[in-house]
Image (cartoon, rainbow, N blue to C red):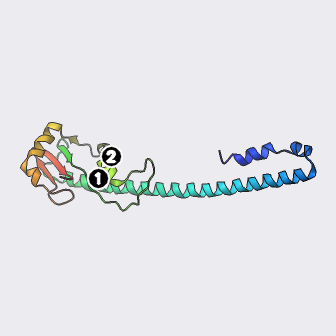
Amino acid sequence: LPLLLPVLLGSQISNQDLVILNDLSQRLLYKLSVFCACGLLLIQAVFGYQFFVTTNYAYTCMALTYENAYAYFTRLTAKIEMQETYSPDAHVAFLGTALQPSSVPDVYMTGALRIDEIVNMYSRYEFLHYFICGSYHYATQEEIDIIKASPKFQQMPCYPAAGSIATIENVIVVKFSE
C-alpha cells in the first residue's frame, strides 16, 4: 500500500480541482502535494532498502544453514555406511539431541531455522531421505528401549566422537547425547 500512495495522491489532485481554488491556494496545494509525494518517495526508498538488506541477510543465513546441515548429514551418513554391519536393510537409530555449534549468525525471523533445529527436528528423516538419499529402516520403539537399557549404549561417547556409532542388537545406533 505505501507504494501506491503517491499514485493515489496524484490522481486526487487534478487540474480541474485546482481551477476552483484561487491562485495562492493553488500554489500552496501544489507545493504541499509535491512535498508529500517527495516525502513518500523518500520513505519508500528507505523501506525498500531495509527490505532488500533484511531479505538478503535472511536468505544468506538460510543458505548457509542448509549447507551446514547438508555437510553434517553427509558426514553422518558416510560414518553410518562405513559400519561393518551396514546393509541397505539394516535398522538405524538416532538417539538423543545433536549438539551442533553453528557459524551462521542468528536470524530472528519466522521460518529461518538454525542448524541445531534442522538436525534435531522431526524432519531429520525427511532431510536425510530427500537431500542425502539416505533411505534407512529406522528402529522401532521396542528396539530403542532395549538399546537404551544396554550397558554398551551407556558407555558410548556422544557424536561426533570415535565410537559414537555402534551396532547394538543388530541396530546401527548413533548416540547424539546422554
Q: Nearer the viewer, residue 94 or 26?
A: 26
- Image quarter for residue 48? bottom right
Residue that sits furthest to the left in the current view: 151
Above/below status of 147 relative to 101: above
- State the residue at coordinates (10%, 41%): 146
- Circle nearer the N terminus (1, 2): 1
For residue 93, side relative to residue 168 (left or right): right
Q: Position of residue 114 (x, y in %)?
A: 37, 53
- Image quarter for residue 27? bottom right
Q: Nearer the viewer, residue 20 or 140?
A: 20
Three-letter code, disc 2: Phe
- Determine if residue 170 is in view: no
- Image quarter for residue 99? bottom left
- Mark 2, other Cα within 10 Å: few <14 / some 14–19 / many ≥20: some
Q: Are marks 1 and 2 in contact (CB under 8 Å)?
A: yes
Q: Nearer the viewer, residue 16 or 173?
A: 16
Q: Nearer the viewer, residue 43 or 72?
A: 43
Q: Position of residue 38 (x, y in %)?
A: 74, 56
Q: Give the number of marks.
A: 2
Q: Which mark is residue 127?
A: 2
SS for callout 1: helix
- Determine if residue 88 is in view: yes
SS for callout 2: helix
Three-letter code, disc 1: Phe
For residue 63, side relative to residue 150 (left or right): right
- State the residue at coordinates (47%, 54%): 59
Q: Position of residue 14 (x, y in %)?
A: 84, 44
Quadrant location of the N terminus in the rendered image: top right
Between the residue at mark 1 and the residue at mark 2, the CA separation in whole angstroms equals: 8 Å
Residue located beneath label 1 in the image: 73
